[in-house]
Every structure is written in structure tokens, then in C-alpha cells.
Amino acid sequence: MIAFLPGFALGFSLILAIGAQNAFVLRQGLRREHVLAVVLTCALSDAVLIAAGVAGMGGLARTLPWFAPLMRYGGAAFLIGYGGLNLRAAWRGGSGLTTGQGAGHALPRTLAVVLALTWLNPHVYLDTVVLVGSIAAQYDDRLAFGLGAVTASFTFFFALGYGARLLAPLLARPGAWRALDAAIGLTMWAIAAKLIAM
């Protein structure tokens, strides 16, 4: 527990901020579309990255100088495109009519988006592989530290995905969905701008 609790606290604090991935999970939870598949994909992806960091793979980014720019610009391009789709949905409106009906995108397309939001985000490598890995190295029980961070990831994504339905009554109106789509689109564009400016 000496290493598990700090790992949990660090893991939770790193994924708490609303980013592109969290915004997507929130949206899927509100729409009740493929929630289990989405939260499992996010949590398992985090688990793989955290395990890589705890195992000492953080040095990979330092030994391959082309890796970080490739991830940064590729991630920014994806976020610009996906943010544009959300802003277009906000402009057109009408997505509030599908709340909770589960009649949206097919599972393969949904998983492709969540995988891209996860694995094309350079911040996820900095947070999970480099930062968690370097802090885990300071503990005698790196495995417990890593398990704490993985547990935090599962806890957060399941709470976000399934807890989002509590907000459904507030977002039952199309105008509220338009505002949510606009907020998600602008968040993705802001993250893309930050990546390009790095």
C-alpha cells in the first residue's frame, strides 16, 4: 500500500483533466453508445502504457528523436479533424435527439476514434510512460505503484463513462448537445494548438 496509494493518486491526477479522450468518453457515456467497449479500451490502453513506463521503456522516446515530433504533429492533425467534426455537429444541431437511444456510430468506427484519441496523443506517452515510469523507479515496489496507477485509470474511465448518464436529463435538449459538441470541438482544437506550439 505504501507504493500503491501514491501510484493511484498520481494516475488519477494525470487523467482528471478534460482532454480529447475524456471528452469522447463523456460523450459516449451521455449517448449510452458502446460505453463498456470505450472505457475498457481507454483503461486497457493506459494499463499497457503504464506497464511500459514502469518496466523502464521511458528511455525509448529519448533514443528515437523523431518519435516525439511524429506523435505531436500526427496527434494535432487528428485532433483538428475530429474537433472540426464536433463543431460541424454543433453548427447543424439535432444530436440531442439521439440521447440514450444507442443509434449512433458502429462499434468499429467508435473504437477507431477512441484508439486514435488515445494512441496519437503525445501527452499520454509523457504522462504514462515517461512520468509514471520515472516516479515508479523511485519506489522499491514498482509493481504496486504501477498497479495503483492502473487502478486509478480503470476507476476514472468507468466512473466517467457510466456516471455521464447522470447528466443526461440536463443534456436532453438539442441546444445543450450543441453546446457540448462545441465545447468538445474547441477543446480538441485548443489541445492541437498546444501540441503544434510545443
Image: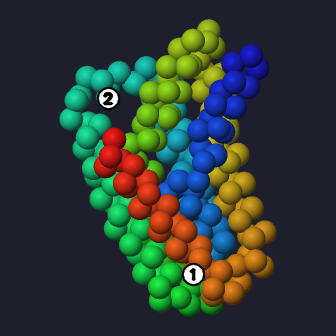
Q: Choose top left, top right, bottom left or bottom right for residue 94.
A: bottom right
Q: Secondary structure at mark 2?
A: helix
Q: Which residue is at a point 65% across and 27% down the rendered structure image? A: 7
Report the amino acid beneath label 1: Arg
Q: Position of residue 9 (x, y in %)?
A: 69, 31
Q: Residue furthest top?
A: 140
Q: Which residue is at a point 22% across and 29% down the rendered structure image? A: 65
- The answer to whether 21 is drawn above or below residue 90 in the figure is above
**Residue 163 shows up from this direction:** yes
Q: Position of residue 150 (x, y in %)?
A: 62, 36
Which residue is labeled 2 in the image?
61
In this view, the mark in front (1 or 2): 1
Q: Secondary structure at mark 1?
A: helix
Report the amino acid beneath label 2: Ala
**Quarter of the image containing the C terminus?**
top left
Q: Residue furthest front?
A: 197
**Residue 110 shows up from this direction:** no
Q: Which residue is at a point 28% across and 52% down the rendered structure image? A: 74
Image check: 123 left or right of 6? left
Q: Position of residue 171 (x, y in %)?
A: 70, 79
Point out which mark residue 178 bears: 1
Q: Earlier in the sequence, mark 1 or mark 2?
A: 2
Q: Position of residue 70 (x, y in %)?
A: 25, 44
